[in-house]
Each structure stands twice: as C-alpha cells, then as structure tokens.
Image (cartoon, coloured by chain):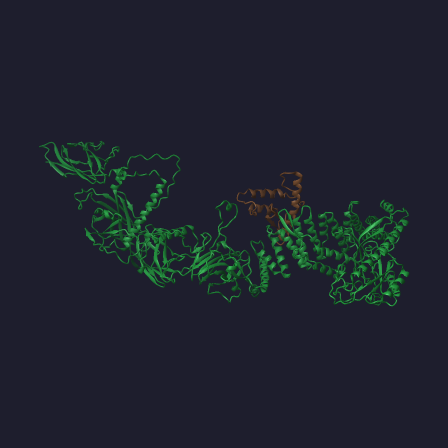
Amino acid sequence: MLFLMFFTGHIRDPNNQLQTVKNLRICVNAVTTNPVSSPAVLSPAQYRQLGEVVSSCQPLEGAAATSFKTGDYNLNLSVTTPWFEAYRENFLQSMPASEHEFLNHYLACLLVVSSTEAVPVEQFLKLSQEQHRIQHSGEYTHPRWFIPNTLKYYVLLHDLSEGDEQRAETVYEDMKQRYGSQGCYLLKINSRAVSAEEDEQIPDPWSQYLHKNNLRYQDPADGAPAAEKGGGASDEEGGGESSCPNNDPLQLEPDSSSTSLVDADVKKARTDTEGVAPVAVGRGSCLTLNDHDRIRQFVQEFTFRGLLPHIEKNIRQLNDQLVSRKGLSRSLFTATKKWFGGGKAPEKGMSEPKSACGLLYPPEAPELQIRKMADLCFLVQHYELAYSCYHTAKKDFLSDQALLYAAGALEMAAVSAFLQGGGARPYPAHYMDTAIQKYRDDCRNMVLAERCALLSAEILKNQGKYSEAATLLIKMTSEDSDLRSALLLEQAAHCFINMRSPMVRKFAFHMILAGHRFSKAGQRKHALRCYSQAMQVYKDRGWSLAEDHINFTIGRQSFTLGQPESAVTAFRQILNDDSKQTATQQAAFLREYLYVHKSVMGEQVKSLPQLPLPCILSAATRVYFGHEPRLAQGEKQAATHVSLDQEYDPELSAMWSRLEEQLVAAANRGIVPVGFQPTQCCLNSQTDNLRQPLAVLNEPIIVEVTFRNPLKVSLALSELSLLWRFSPHVSSLSIREPVSEQLTGEVIGNEETLTTPNLSKDDIVTTEIIQEFHLNPEETRTARLKLLPHRTGQLSIVGVTYNLSSSSSETTEEHYSMELVVRGRQDLNIQGPRLNQTKEEKMSVRHGTDRRLDAIITPPMPLMEVFFLHFPSALLCGEIRKAYVEFCNVGAVALCGLRVASTHPEFFTFGCNNPTPSSPASAEHGSAYKTFAATVQPEIPIDGGTLHPGQSIQLPLWLRGPDQEGVHEINFLFYYESTEKGLKVSHRVLRHTVFICASRSLSVQASACRSTAPPQRSADSIGCDGTLVFVDVENVNTSEGGMREFHIVQVSSSSQRWRLHKYINPDKDNDCKLSSREKAKLCFRATPCVPLPASMDSVEKYIFADLNLGNEQIISSSTPCRDFFFRCCRGLELQQEDKTSRTGSKNKTVSTPDNCTSDPAAIAKKCNELDLTIIVIWKAFVVEDSKQLILEGQLHVALQTIGKEATSLMPKEEAQEMVLLKFKSDLPPPVALPSPEMSQLIKTNLHYPETFSHGFLQDSLCMVPVTLTLSNCCSAPIEVLIDLRHRSTSAESLEFHSLFSWVGQSQYKLLLRPHEVLSLALRACFFRAGVYNLNTARVFAKPAQQSSMSESNQQAASPALIIINST
Amino acid sequence: MAVCIAVIAKENYPLYIRSVATQNELKFHYTVHTSLDVVEEKISSVGKALGDQRELYLGLLYPTEDYKMFRKLHNSFTDVMCNPFYNPGDPIQSKAFNGVVSGMMVQTG
C-alpha cells in the first residue's frame, strides 16, 4: 500500500545550512518479502497493469481540444496526454528497488500495534525483532533498506470506538519511557461508531492517495514505491518537490499481522493492509474530521520528529565518514572539489566478480556510500550537494568500469543538475544520453533505460528542446513493447508539434506510427484517437493513399470500438471518388464498408442511410414526362415523338419550339400568348428548368439517372427505385427539404415505406422498381426509373434507393456477397446553371435553381397517338404518294383543335374530304382551266372537330417527294387541346420525325419567249400576244434496279395571269415517253387571261389549265395536285423572300427607287414578267420485285420572266460567297441598263409581201409597201425612235444593204401608249431583182419621261427576207 | 537511384508522385509527406539568411550528390510549367516528365 502526503519541512545540511524541504511526499508500503522479478524487464503482469492504466485513462469527451494553427493547417489537438502521465507514474512506481541505487529503498519502519493487544509493548518488541531479522539476516533480498540502522517508529493505534482509552494512554506512556517521545506515537482513530448505514457521506480521505493502488493489490511485485520524481517538469510545482520513500514494515506473516492489525478493522482505513476484503466499501467511514486531523498530525510528527532528523543525522554521518576516509578536508565541498581535480578512487580492493553490467559492489563499499549520501541529499532536495556526490560517484564508478552504477549516477547527476535550476550549472544533457546508452547497450536493462529516457525527455521538453526530446523518444521505441513504443511515439509527435516552427507533418506521421503501435498493443481507443488526429493533417490534401490508409484504419477501429457511424463515415471517404487503390484493395474496402454498414443497419432502421456508391451524375439526370413512345405496330408506324434515347440538340429543340409557336399563334388567331412556354417533354441539363414541369395524372414520369462506378470492382445494385415526396397542394415552397411543420401530414413520401417494402403507397404514386442493375468497373450507366402519379398535386423526386452489394464474379463468394447487401439511398440534388448576370454572380459561384425534379401533377389531359400507314421511306423527286394517318385519343379527355406544322409544308397535304364544288370546267382548245382561290388549311379536318377518348380517325395523307434528291429530315408537330378550357396545360404537342430518301426522277427545264407572230393573227387578241413556252423534260433517274420509264401525262399551268393554251408539238405524238437519260422538248403556247377582277385582289386567284398529253385527264385543280402546287409555291416564295432579304441586308446598294413606274428597269421587268407555273404530271413505270408499279408524280417549274430559263431541280444552293470586308463603300454600279431587259420594250413586226414581181424594164425603181407594226409590251408609255437609214455598215453586209433604200420619211419619233399597237407604212425602193433583208431599221425605245435616258436599241429581229422578181 | 520522386505544390499537395515498388507506395507517400517539414525548415532558414535570393535548390535533404537529380528534374518541371495547356496546380500528367522521372528511378526488373 502506498500512502503519500505532502509536507514542507526543514533540514540542515552538513554545513549546518538550513535547507527547506518543500512538498515532501511520504510513501508508506507494507513490507513484503516476496522476491521481485529481475529489474531488467517488466513482468507480463506489470505490462498488463500498465496497459490497463493506459486504457482506463482516456481523454474526456470534448475536453481540452485546443485548436492549433500553423501554415495552412488548422488542427484540433488535445494538449494534455493524461494517459501518458498515468503510464509514467505507474511505470516509475512499479520499478523494483535495484541494487545500484538507493532511491527505492526503505528509510524508516513504522511499527504499529493496536491498543487492544494484550501486551502491546511485547508486540512492539516482537515487531522490532522481526524487522531486524528481515533487514539483517540476509534471508530476504527484497525489501531493501537504505541505511543499516533503519529508523523505527512505534505507533500505538487506538480505536476509540472499541478500546479503553485510559489503557492506551498508559501504554503510550510506557512507550515514551522506552523509546523516547520522539520515537513513538499514540494514534487515536475511529471516533465514530460503525453505523455505516448513516448516510452522512464523509469523503474517503484515502481516495486521493490510493486511487492507483487497487489494481496493484493482487500484484505481488508492487513492493517499492518509486521514489524519484525527478521529471517533475510537467507538474505544477515545477520540479520543486521530492519524495521520500519511507517504510512501514508491518509484518506480513500471518502470526504477526494478528498482533499488529487485528484491531484495525475493515473500516479503519489506514491500516487495512493486506487487502482486507471489501475494498469497494468506502474506506475511512469511521473517521471523523478530527481523526483526519489526528492522522495528519501523526504523519507530520513522524516526519519532523522522526524522519527528517534521522536523514539529517545520516547525511552528517556519511559526510563525516567520507571526509575522514579521504582525510583531505573537513568540508565536503572542498573534498568534492578535490575529487573533481582528479582524486583517484583506489578502493578497488575488493575484487568483485564482474557481472554483465560491470562491477558489483558490496553494500558497504565507499563508492556506494557516496551514492547513498547523494540519494539522501536528493531526497531532501539538497540538489547541489546531491549533484556533487553523484558526480563523484560517477567518476568512481566509471573508473571501476561499473557500468550500471555509473549509468545510475550519471542519470541522477543530470536530474539533480536540472532540479538545481537557476542556471548554476548547464544541464549536462550528454550525461543522460550516456546513461541511456549504458543502460540499454551495456546493461541490457530496458526498464531503466526507459526510465532514464522518460526523465530525460521531460527535462528536455521543459527546456524547450523538443526536437532532441523527440529524437530521444523515437530512439527508445522498440519491437518488444508496443504500448511503450506507442506512447513514446505519441509523445514524440507532440514534441514535433510543440516546436517553435511546428513540424506538422512529422507530427502526423508519428501519430500514425503511434496509432499503429497502439492498435498492436490492443489500445483501440488510443489508436483511433491518434489516427483521427493525424487525419487532420492529411485530409483533403491529395495524399490519397495515405488518406485511404488512415480512413480505413479509423473505420476499422471505430467499428471494433462500437462506433459504427464513424466507421461508416470513414469508409465512405475511402470509397468516395477517384481512388488510386488497386482493384483488390478497393474490393476489400467495399466489402468492409458493406459489412460495417450492415451491422449499423441492424441497429437502426429508421431512415435509409446515404450510400457513397455509385456516384450519381446528378446534372446528367433527365426527366421524361409521358409514355414511352411506342414503335411500329404492324404496318402502323407510330409517331416518333420524343424519347430518352434521343440526344438533346439545341438546334432541333429550337426548331420544335418555333413550330410550336407557329401553331399556338395560329390557334390563338395569330397572337402568341404572353406566357407561352414551349412544351418540354424531356428535361435535361440544357433545357430551361426554371419552372416546375407539368406532368399529367396517370401518365408516367421517367427519370433517367446516370450512375458512375468509380471503383475498379463491379457493383451490383438491386431493387432500384425512386424516392419521392408528394403533397396534394401545389405551393411554391419546395418540398424537397424535410417537411416543415405546417406541411406535416400533407406531405407524403415513400422513404419510410421502402424500408418495409410490403407497405407501399401505390395508390398515390406507383413506383417502378428495377430488380437488377449491374455496374462494371469504372462504368457509367443510366437507369430509367418510372413513377406513375395517381393524384394531382406536387411531386418531388428526392432521390434513389437501392440495395448495394459488391457483385461477385466468383461463385464461391455467392453466399457471402448475398449477406453483404446494404439498403440505402442517395439524394438527387441538381444544381442549376451557374449564374453569370450580375457582378456578384460573376465574382462568386452561384447556381440557379433547377426544378426538373419538382413536377406538378395536373388533371388528366387528352393524349393523342398518331400512326402512319403505308408511309414510304423513299420517294422519287416530285412523286405523289397517298398514305394514311390515324389519330387516336388514348387519354381520358376529349381533344380538339388538332393542327399540324412541319418544317417541310410542301411535303404533305391532308386531302379535303369535302371537295370544293368545281366550277364548270371550260374546255377551250383542249385545255381545261379553273380558277381557285389560294387557300391555306390550318386545321386537320376532323369530323366534328373533337376526338373523344378512345376514338380514332383515319385520314388520307398525300405526300410528295421533295424536289431535291437526298435524304430529308421532315418534322411534324401535331398540336391539340383539351376540350376543357382553363387548364394549366393549355395544349399538348406530339412530334414526329421522318426521313425521306428522295431519288431523281425528271428534270424539267422551261423557258418562255415572246412569240414573234403578229398579234392580229393570234386567236385571242387582247393586248399583247401569247408567249411560247418550251419545256425540256429529261429523265435523270439513275437507279440501276428496275427499268423506269416516265410518261408525261399532262402538263398544267397555274398562274394568276397566264394559262397554257395549246400544245404545239411538231409531230403530235401525244404520249410522251422517256426512258433513262432520254430527253424531250415540249412546246406550248400560253396566253394571258382575262384581267384580274379588281374586286378580288385581296385573295389571289389562280387559274389552272390542263393540257393532257395522254388519254386521261387529271384535274390539276383538285386535291393533291392543287394542294401541292400551293404548298410548293408558297415555299418557293418564302425561300426567295428569305434570300432577297438576306442578300438585301448584306448588299445595301441594291436599292430600287420607290416609284416603280418611273423606273425603266422596273418597267422593263414588268414587261417581261410572266409568273407562270408549269405543272408536269408524270407517271413512272417501275419494276420492283418483279412487279410493275406505276408511280405518279408532279413537278413544278415556276417561270418568272420571259427569256429566263427555270428548272424544276433546284440549283444547288451556292455557298455564300465570301464578301470581302470593304472599307470604302462601292461606287454605285453604272446606270447603264442591262440590255436584254430594255431591248424587250418594243416588239416590231414587218409586214410585206413575201415575193414581189416588178418589171424593172418598165420602171427601174420598184417600190414595195411595207408595214412596220410596233407594239408596246409594257404598261408604260414608250418613246420610240425609228431610224430607217442603214445601220452602221459592217463589211460584209455592205453591198447587201446598199441595194435598196427606204423612201419617204426615214426617221420617225413616236410615242406609244401602254400596250398600244401602231403600224407605220413604209416604202422600200429596190433597183433590181433579188433577195433582200428588209430588217434594217433600227428602233430605239425608251420609256417616256426618261429624257435623260439614252435610247436603247431594240432587238434585231430575224432577217426579213423579200424576194423581188423581175418580170 | 531514386525510389520515389514527388513534386509537391506550394499548398502541400502532390502534383506528381511516383515510386518504384507498388507494395511500399504508402510508406513512400508518408515519407515524402513527412519530409516536407524538413523542406519547410530549410526554406524558412534560407529565407531569413539570404533574403530574396532566387536560389531554388535547397540543398540535399539526403546526400545524393552522386546523381545530378535536381537539375534534371527541375528542368523538366520547368518545361511542364511552360506548357500553355498546363493549369498550375493541377496534377502533372506529362509523358516527358514521366520519362525523365523514370530515367531517374531505380531500374527494377
């Protein structure tokens, strides 16, 4: 038993100087004679005990975590390490007393006898003899005694509750007589009755001193208390205290114990020596406060009257002895000085056997006397004297090669030098190093070496020499004791962090080493703490391997310590992201994680845990509203609509929204409503997700979640499904977050039910579950998860839930992996796009909201499905095909307002089911023509306009192959509304995309020229005469399979002013056949029609005229033909407008003067305007699969102007020429008019007799009348100048012309009114017979009022030949 | 020659780290990380003594004067930094740098 008390006393040194002894501690131990183990190693029991001490001493929860900042490191550390202090304390106390030093040896002996003893004096005698026997008989080695004549102090213990006080007093008087009043004491205790039941709690007075000793009871080795407390640096007293071991040899033999202690019953605390049973019962409960005082007084008495004088006396004695022996000086100081000066230590007479540690001295050797004196001085805190003695002893020992002794002396010399303080002497650090080295290497005594190192480290730390301390501590770690190594490493780590420039990384590294050793020593909590502290340094700094290692260890340790939550967190971090671990390592991590997780799950089932794997790329999440589009059903082809398989294309979506806008505008009388928002069926990261999407009741919501497996092992997910929250009330509040108070009860989620899967909430929202989902190593895969809402309200998709397990490819692990399945969840949190509008947004990283997962469920809407029947995939250019389209309302509500828009409106037409009553076809000259107003059909004709639920309707759909060959993408957008108005969803749309491959069929080129025939001859004599139209048709089909022969069945015209009048093919072969690469030219005559009725000018009227070449007549004004004409022409016009606007915007110089009438160019243009569309209707005979097919088609050629060639094949869009950037504006182009246009203003005809006979013999001059007919083709007055004089002569025509001349007025100046025809009578004069060309007249024309304008030469007509016969 | 070569960013995270034997990788990483303390110490002492001198070579942490390692490595590192496509602070993923480092590493079969 140990008993310490602190006192302050005084002692006189050998020089009679008064020395203060502060904080003296007294250790009291029971005397045991049991042998102790060798001091070189600790027994396993001691190790165990130290382990227990360390593990029982844990850092307090949340205590003393000081934050520590250095560089960019911000650490939270506990500065104190109480477990280490406890270890140190315990370690030092468990040191057995060794031979080479006296510090653990007993100084005095308390002999205690109870007053109830019959003859106490006799007992004292007995005890005294016993003590003497133990010390001097040589039988026992164990209780080592400091000085041969040990101080005996006789104590009579009197139990006030039992014994007779009077008697005790008498005995005490007797004792005083016998032993002197300073050598004995009467201690009265237990003034209180044993009434332990009394609940008045007096604190156990011994607890303070005994707290560590319970454990030690059963340990036989706990003989001597450690005496030195040299390393007091960490204590508050600052190293000022010392302690004095002092012994209380209460005999332990059974017989004597009865004498001494029988009376001291259980509760009589101080004397309950050898483990009187109920330790747990509070000691000292019979002691009153008075008793405490008495005990304190007793110890004080003992110390001051007995112990200190005893020590003082002994020091004096030893000093005298030494001085006299050396005979050199009276003063020890001078003597020591002499010894310093090289005094020999000749007393080596006793030839001792050399042990492993060098010499062994007999107990009375003078060297040991010095050491003894030094130790005594040290105990009473006379460090100066102690140091000099130690120093002397050290020299002696060293010269004697007594290594163990020398090491001890060195150690103590260093300690006393340190404790001396005050800079009297520099601290001899090398002493310690030498001591440690000698202990360890020479004496192989690790225990002592460790002690020495601990002391040294404390001293170094106290001096601020942290790096040396750390080195020392690290040096002391070894393989033999994990606990010690761990503690020392941890201390070293603390040293590193406490350095002036803290070495954070070294700290961390040594913490890890310490943690490792702790875990090897079974100190899990300490290990975990070490790793956690080290983690602060490594965390998030890219040292991924180290981080993984630490996390893994933390996870393991936390799990074994029953902190599965932190284990799970640690493991999560390992599995988090791009780990550089190998696949096997990752598999191990994963397995461990799952295992840990599973055990956590077993405990708490309340909420699903968040799983770290696999990674969800939440930004890539796509949400699709509606049914998945069905594919072909038999020969029915469903509308493609939108599907998740399609990639998002911003251009396409812009196109669709443009189409939708068109439709919405059409449905709302041309105005797009303000809040128009294009329908988005599929939401992804690029779509506009600012507002909540609308989903329709009973229509599925499909969420595509992208999973990425970051690991190099495959993962198996199962029972994958979505987590949602539903609120029947639509509010702007997000219900993603855990429910706020007022909403509780309204918000329903499926998170809870999923833990107990049999209880599903299918009546609100049906959740589809994917049973198996496998992710290969480092694979990214998407899963489509479906929800089907059954109630209106707000539905938020919160996350996904699944079972995670590591998929085992090996079959052997099958059952094992089956075990390791963890159910968990991951939330889907989608960040909106980064905001970049305001300055703050640019400065910081802010994200917009993304509400694609927060859908609003609206009441049911109609749902239309569109099917196409006989829809071709390839067409000839211009081919007309009839297909059927079926509209089917599969929703629960009737639909109406069905419309369609397309990117290629000329591609298709819905036939009119109610054909317009055909106006009586007037067949004139084989041509039939009709007049129609150009109409546009916006709506798809449905009977009644509505389509009821379940109803379907089939309509014919005419298709016409695009004019250009190649693959065409044609987009349809069907639009429909619910019959109920005022819903959130105003309309719905359905998309369809087809690809049509167009192959070449016929190429039609048409040109028109003014017929030169004089107007009088033409049948209809209205204004200007007809126009000749030449149509070149070429079979340009190049298909190798199937011979194709094209028949031109009919040529029709459509124009506002013109019509085809007559087919004037030379050889009248009506049926025009063309096989491959053949070409035919068809000639027609077109005539202008009745002038447009002015009243109808708002609606453009078109005149259709048909000229059939075959036997059958196709009425071009009826459904497919006319529709396509309108659609094509409109398309063309649009295109041209588009083009001109484009060029116009680029090229500003093309500016036309406003008043067209005055502009000669415009006039000329107008004059040449034709605006006639030729429709060529053909039939093609194709052999396909040994079947002959007849395909029909029509081609359009729009003739704009006379003389200009037009073709059905669109010229390939020329790449827009790069316009050089010009810095100077171009000079305006010269005003010179393009001659071809201006030369067409006037048409001239010469009328004359073809042959003319004249008798030149009679009259040498032959006069022939010639009429020149001038007709103005324009709608503007034209000034004409006719010059009959011969043209500027060219060489060869000279003689030709000179043969005749015009007579009469040879120059005319005329003004022709619009469309006026004027005849001029001319006369030609011939001199001889021959053939003459009369067409020599030059006609200049210019629009009237354009005086400035130079007249332009009119077209030179073909030679007009006249034959003059001579008779 | 070398068993582990690392380039560490100013903020103490590795830009590049490579070691020979895979089984000891963790240990090497720990060692490299711990040696940063020594580097820091050297830097602080150099900074005090010499002011703003542009000497980048801190001297040897360990005597390896036999091999002209630092110059080679630093030249290569400069090349990496000069690459306009390299974003300072990113882990180094350069073939050339890798090659230089491989040349400096212990050649183990």
* Above/below status of A355 relative to A817: above
Output the letter for the chain in green. Answer: A
Residue A433: give x, y in percent of width and height.
76, 49
Residue lying at the far left of the rendered structure: A1258
Residue A1332 shows in the view: yes
Residue A1005: give x, y in percent of width and height.
28, 47
Q: Which quadrant of the view contains residue B53? A: top right
Residue sitting at 86 percent across and 64 percent down? Answer: A168
* Left or right of A725 on screen, residue A1253: left
Quadrant of the image for the C terminus of chain A?
Answer: top left
Q: Which of A1257 and A798 is in front in this view?
A: A798
How many numbered marks, from 0 up? 0
Residue A97: give x, y in percent of width and height.
81, 57
Q: Which of A1288 and A1073 is in front in this view?
A: A1288
* Left or right of A1002 on screen, residue A49: right
Residue A1100: give x, y in percent of width and height.
26, 49
Residue A1083 shows in the view: no
* Left or right of A788 on screen, residue A1087: left
Q: Nearer the viewer, residue A709 or A177?
A: A177
Quadrant of the image for the N terminus of chain A?
Answer: bottom right
Residue sitting at 53 percent across and 43 percent down? Answer: B84
Q: Which quadrant of the view contains residue A1274? A: top left
Chain B drawing hue: brown
* Left or right of A1202 on screen, residue A1246: left
